[in-house]
Image (tube, rainbow, N blue to C red):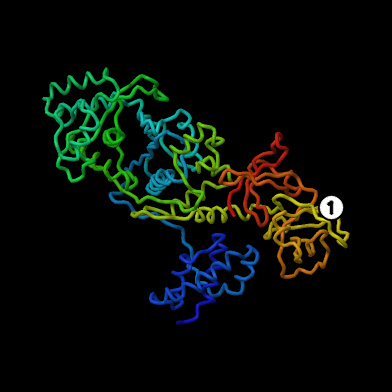
Amino acid sequence: MKDLSKEILAYALHNAIEYNKTSPDRILPKLFQHGLKKEEIKEIMPKLQEIVKRVNSLKPEEIKKQFQEYKDIVKVHEEKPRELSELPNANKKMVFRLAPFPSGALHIGNAKTYLLNALYAEKYKAKTLLIMDDTIGSEEKQSINEAYELIQQGLDWLNVEYNKPIIYKSDRLKIYYDYAEQLIKKDKAYVCHCVQEILKENRAKGIECGCRQFPVKEQLKRWKEIFKAKPGSAILRIKTSMQDPNPAFRDRVLFKISDRPHPRVKNKYRVWPTLEMTWAIDDHLLGITHVLRGNDLAIESDMEKYIWDIFGWPHITLIHTGLVKIEGAEAKISKSKAQKEVLSGQFTGWDDPRTWSLQSLARRGIKPEAVREFVKEIGLNKQDIITPIDSLYSINRKIIDSSSNRYSFVENPLELEIKNAPSVKKIQITIHPDKKETREIEINKISISNKDFKALNGQEIRLLHLYNIKLGEPSKFTSSENKEIPRINWTSNPVKTRILMPEGNWVLGAAEQAISKLKPDQIIQFERFGFVRFDNFNQETNTYDFWFAHK
């Protein structure tokens, strides 16, 4: 087998620059361009894993420096703007819909589906309707008042254009009642009073419910009575074949009773339609032509088609996409989970970074154009896929890097005593590797991270941009030569600084004086730490507070 050590190292370094870290599965496909054969994969894996581990242990500047030696090996395909695939039945009169359920802010997961609809609407210059899917929901997943505004804020931040006014399903109950009555008159729906256990057993066995046998006239009477019935005592069901191969499709629920107050219409209504009932009616009445939705809603799509066929309505184009799991230990996203933790006070609000809401991404310094490109790159995936959150970070890094000036920050600072240090009072450091402008740092009492001191005590290290010392108690000046030794951050006359991490914890430390001149919302890079967004000066803690974006 050909020795591919150099090729592995080249792609590992290139990948680490792109995503801040690398992994064997990202490098392996590249090696086939250099002669690797499938039967050799098992043989090459130990070497691949060893190099990956070594590269991931390097500092960013060491990775960039080493890559210069191997960059000619890497075969980089010319990046072309990612184009969305064509949709079936495309025409000049297409209408898309965004139908979020207002149980909380949009997060990076569910925003993908809404943004994909919006991106296709832009592609075809189509109309986009924003329809608040605000039926009563369930006890576990309830709509809340603040969600309406949060959703609009998120879509506006993403620069999604939609027609005004916004449509609220909670304003359309009488329309749904009318079509429910029409279904009953067509002998296609019936009021059921059976207890849940019997219903479940009948569906499993394919046995028709006794309530289904009443004539249309009696069903209409029972329908009128349902509006005064107790919750759980009656539901409206659609008539399907009780021998349908999918038990879940047999006589599905169309309406249920709930006395829970609705955030918009309060207690005005107590008989509420299911989402698939409202989708079937509204997609037809509002002229929707294309719906992009997840594979998990396939049965709801089948129910829509079933209802359209009852009324003799033409089918619109329903397109299903695979689910997208965003890989990353911290990227556990759920609107219902976030709602519980926001309302309980466990999270600080809907912009808490642990919600992964669009509001939280904005506050961290993620740009809306990065989210748009991230979703565009995923595209119309037919199968379930896993995509790393690092892909979003990589896109965002390219957008913000050139405008993000560099500053120094040290975590848990420890002041050094340095013997024989040069009498340097001030130094000029460039604000960015690609810029000529400099920032002035006054040299006084130097502090480094306590973690760095413990890890490198007794070794010669270089204070980044300054000079070399041998760490100890006290430390000693050794030289000004820019040698290949560990480089660490330091501060002089620092200001107290906090950084809020995606996991919700604060990293406490100190940063150079120059950050005191930053304006809120400015994004900078703390060298060797990561990109951060300046939030505010916190008078209670007397700290300059930042939110962490990514490496």
* Residue drawn 17% across the image and 22% down it: 220
Establish if 315 lies above or below 378.
Answer: above
Tally of numbered tags: 1
Q: From the image, which quarter does the C terminus lie in?
A: bottom right
- Packing grade of label 1 (10 A; few <14, some 14-19, many >=20) is some
* Residue drawn 22% across the image and 18% down it: 225
Nearest the viewer among 391 and 445 is 445
Residue 36 rendering spot, x and y as whole percentages? 43, 77
Residue 75 rendering spot, x and y as whole percentages? 50, 72
Nearest the viewer among 194 and 110 is 194
Establish if 378 lies above or below 313.
Answer: below
Establish if 333 lies above or below 130.
Answer: below
> At label 1, which amino acid type do we have?
Asn
Residue 199 rendering spot, x and y as whole percentages? 21, 33
Q: From the image, which quarter does the N terminus lie in?
A: bottom left
User: Callout 1: helix, strand or loop?
Assistant: loop
* Residue drawn 46% across the image and 77% down it: 34
Question: Which residue in the structure is indicated by mark 1?
Answer: 444
* Residue drawn 56% across the image and 63% down it: 16
Establish if 406 lies above or below 538.
Answer: below
Residue 170 rendering spot, x and y as whole percentages? 36, 27
Left or right side of 486 for 316: left
Left or right side of 50 for 415: right
Left or right side of 337 for 286: left
Q: Quadrant of residue 461?
A: bottom right
Left or right side of 336 for 172: left
